Image (cartoon, rainbow, N blue to C red):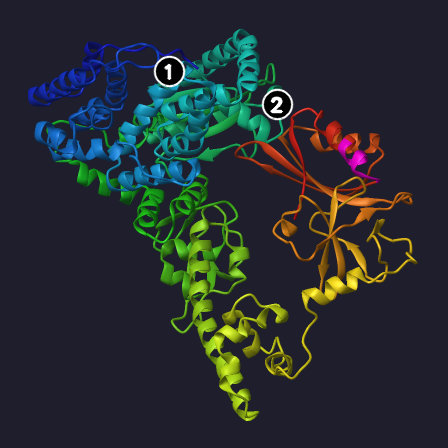
Amino acid sequence: MSEFKEVSFEECMEHVKTYIHNSDSLEKIQEAYEFASEVHKTQKRKSGAPYITHCIQVADTLALIHCGPRTIEAGLLHDTVEDCEGVTYDTIKEKFGEEVAEMVEAVTKVGKIKFQDEEDYQASNHRKLFIAMAKDVRVIYIKLADRLHNMRTLQYMKPEKQQRISKETLSVYAPIAHRLGMNEIKSELEDLSFKYLKPREYENIKELVQTRVSERNEQVQMMIKDIQTILNSYHIPYRIFGRSKHFYSIYKKMVNKNKRFEEILDLYAIRIITDTVTHCYEILGYIHATYRPIPGRFKDYIAMPKANLYQSLHTTIVEPTHGNIFEVQIRTEEMDEVAERGVAAHWKYKENSNFNHQTRQKDIEDSLAWFRDFSQMTDEESEDAKEYMSVLQKDIFEANVYCLTPRGRVITLPPGSCPIDFAYRIHTDVGHKTVGAKVNGAIVPLNTKLNNGDVVEILTNKNSPGPSPDWIKIVRSGHARNKIRSFLQKKNREEQKEMIKQGEQMLKEEISRRNLDEKLIEPQRLETIIGSLSYKTLDDFYIGLANKRVSMQAVMDRIDTTKAKAMEDDDIIKLYNKPNANRKKSETGVIVPGIDTIAVSLANCCQPIPGDEIVGFISQGHGVKVHRKDCPNVAHETKRLIPVQWEDDLEEKQYEAQLVIHSDDRNYLLSDIVTVIQQCNVNLRHVDSGVDTNSLTATTKLTVGVKNAAHLQNLMANLKKVRSVRDVIRVIQ
């Protein structure tokens, strides 16, 4: 990762003048700089540098990707409304026009809004950014340039802020830069985030790369000379150079593919730039004729561009003399510019052109399949901020399966998607009316996994009853899942309304048949008996009655006051207080002082074990349930709690306890955990482990058999000593 050098405004303008020559445009940029300098003049960065230096670096990044003059003006002014007293949207609009003012407003962070937590705040902030982006892609250019300089100067922030900003950059800004094909910015954002999130791993990879630089460079140069000899003989114009892989990219390959550093084939690659597409394929042919290509490693992104418009030929070859492996990338000059700078380079600003930003925005939507889907999703208002960000993360950032409609429209989907995901991505109504699908001309089941290049045709029927609940288990995209869930919830609400009416009518008819007073089924009276029937609300009770989950006779037994009542609390207490001197030994190891005629069992929710402070809860029909005193399920109980205690001379037996271990993911983690359990003479009953690939953390769930609380505490203390383990928690369900 190269060191960053801040530029002056004069140096920035030199970059601007390489493609902007109009005097009025240059004057407006100068005016924006002078205005920003004036309103920021008393402000300093955390580094102690004048605040205007930040605005200049943002403008310079925009100039390097050939943004238009209005965008550069907005880059210089992007913090004025937020941070400078007396500067408003109207101020910017009056001085620099509505177009610039709208960009500045869109880039401005969410203001003083009250949110429940930091997650809510971030999700709402990001949603605002993406909505603005869907309207004008230039907003994200400015925001990415802003974030890039902030990351370059992150060393001046407190560690906790470094962590928060880096995590946000890696999960939101880097993926967007990638989707826009802005590879240089994306790679630098990833490496900088990696540096602060995983400093130890970052330094390890940096050291490994540096120790092999001279050796690898020598190998690359030798290979370049050999390829030059080949190409010179065919008189093909070209540029050729070596390319090193970024640190975070190396780290991801090591983690995701469980490979050692030495096993990564393309730490260094060779890139060949030529003038035409024809020459690209010619060069590929000459290289394959000379060197053995590795099967399965050839990719033709020229014929089938990536979703971010990236085009190139990729092949991996073996150098015969020493057996060295090289990745070779072949592309035209235009392709190379788009590959490094993304869509900003593809639609870069050109003077004396009628290509305004509205036209460009539409062109981007027409050319980038994912952006069209993104704009469509952003226009929908059904998702809240958190849900919206979740869908965006999965369906846009992580989507890498490209399928086609019969008319050639590209649909981008997350890995593992099926025809149902495809249908909902076309349109919600298409998804709801789906009855079948064809893939590559053949009828397939709806749960068929789609692959890159599949041509998918959705079969619909206007009389279809709509999606099945089973579809939620099949689909992989959050967008489809939300649409199916929304449909089913609406359908369920309508069905429930009918069931409630039906149940209420059934009860009225029964009351009438028995010649009983209708006052007996007034809501206030019914609410006193529905609890004994295991229902929480009157609506649930009516639905149960309509579904015949509760018998009418059982209901009438409780309504008719002449029938025997259920045991009251006082009766239960009297039973508990009944003297009995002949106490038997408890099978659970728990005794109720003064009584042995009532059943005693350990609560499943908190799973008490000898040594825990415990309390008894009297339940109707189930005797005494023994809970830990800190169990939330009995925290608010008063009347039904009774004292209980552990036997003094407990027979040795195993008690179950459930633990959750939070840790950083690593090789042999589970093996080390199991070893510690064995060393502590603990019986392992069940184990389940899962890994979050985004945060590289692991969650391990254990069910263990222990003798008592001291035995369990000893196990937990030893588990906390295991390398990479952060926390060990005893679970209460």
Q: Residue 545, how many percent across, how many down?
A: 56, 77
Q: Residue 375, how many percent across, how many down?
A: 31, 46
Which residues are the magenta region?
707-713
Q: Between 341 and 58, which is closer to the camera in this rendering?
A: 58
- Please name the residue that numbered disc 1 is placed on: 153
Against 229, residue 619 (above or below) is below
Residue drawn at (19%, 10%), measured in percent from left and top? 10
Among all residues in the image, which is located at the extreme top?
A: 214
Quadrant hosting residue 491: bottom left
| Magenta-colored segment: predominant secondary structure | helix
Q: CA distance from mark 1 to mark 2?
A: 34 Å
For label 1, the SS is loop
> Is 708 one of the magenta-colored residues?
yes
- Please name the residue that numbered disc 2 is placed on: 263
Q: Residue 729, how many percent across, how many down?
A: 67, 36
Residue drawn at (12%, 33%), measured in percent from left and top? 90
In this rendering, the label closer to the viewer, 1 or 2: 1
Q: What is the tally of numbered marks visible in this picture?
A: 2
Q: Dot 2: within a 10 Å radius of its alpha carbon, few (fewer than 14), some, or many (20 or more) residues?
A: few
